């Protein structure tokens, strides 16, 4: 089921974030990354990592950006899908804000604690036609407020190419 896969991807992203916590991702030169028809401008502190299928991620020492292709949202309206997604997330995470609809994306902020480390996630659900993508920006809570202005800037730079 796609919802279960999305939750699993979100939780897996948390473990990746824990493994790379440290240096600020926003302190670097602007760099544009392109993979699987998506372009994002972040900093040269990130490294592009290809995943399975269309999935890919950008890793720095303090922040991760994970792109997960959901595919078509069949047999659901987008609102029903968002409601179900939020209900599933609430079982393991605290919703800090959202979901809201901004600049063509559904956005929400989440907080969770795993193994004593609190992590904040800035989640976006974006669409290219009927193809849906979940984009997760994550870092430790202690770094989140410093990263947030840059995360929102990076999020706004995402576009589909090709």
Image (spheres, rainbow, N blue to C red):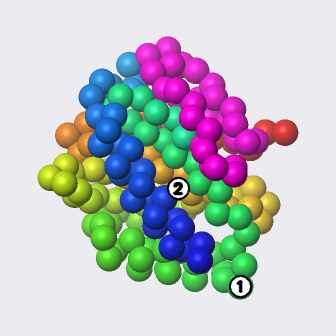
| Element type at mark 2 | strand
Residue 38 within the segment the image draws in magenta: yes
Reply above or below: 150 against 43: below
Quarter holding the N terminus is bottom right
Q: Residues within 10 Å of mark 2 (few under 14, many from 20)?
A: many
Q: From where the camera sits, is residue 65 visible?
A: yes
Residue 86 % position (x, y): 43, 74
**Residue numbers of the magenta segment:** 28-56
Q: Is residue 20 left or right of residue 48?
A: left
Can you tell which of label 2 and label 1 is closer to the viewer?
Answer: 1
Q: Is residue 82 left or right of residue 19?
A: right
Residue beneath disc 2: 124
Residue at 51% x, 73% y is 4
Label 2 to label 1: alpha-carbon separation? 21 Å
Q: From where the camera sits, is residue 145 visible?
A: no
Residue 117 % position (x, y): 19, 49
Residue at 40% x, 25% y is 26
Residue at 39% x, 71% y is 89
| Element type at mark 1 | loop
Residue beneath disc 1: 75
Residue 154 % position (x, y): 52, 36
Residue 106 falls in image quadrant: bottom right
Q: How many marks?
A: 2
Callout 2 touching callout 1 (CB < 8 Å): no
Residue at 32% x, 76% y is 91
């Amino acid at each position: 089921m796609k919802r279960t896969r999305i939750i699993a991807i979100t939780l897996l992203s948390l473990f990746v974030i824990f493994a790379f916590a440290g240096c600020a991702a926003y302190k670097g030169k602007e760099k544009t990354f392109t993979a699987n028809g998506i372009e994002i401008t972040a900093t040269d502190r990130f490294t592009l990592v290809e995943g399975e299928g269309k999935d890919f991620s950008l890793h720095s020492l303090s922040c991760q950006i994970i792109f997960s292709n959901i595919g078509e949202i069949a047999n659901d309206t987008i609102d029903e899908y968002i409601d179900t997604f939020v209900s599933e997330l609430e079982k393991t995470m605290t919703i800090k804000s959202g979901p809201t609809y901004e600049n063509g994306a559904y956005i929400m902020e989440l907080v969770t604690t795993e193994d004593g480390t609190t992590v904040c996630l800035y989640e976006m659900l974006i669409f290219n036609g009927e193809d849906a993508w979940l984009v997760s920006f994550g870092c430790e809570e202690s770094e989140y407020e410093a990263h947030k202005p840059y995360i929102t800037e990076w999020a706004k730079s995402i576009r589909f190419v090709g």
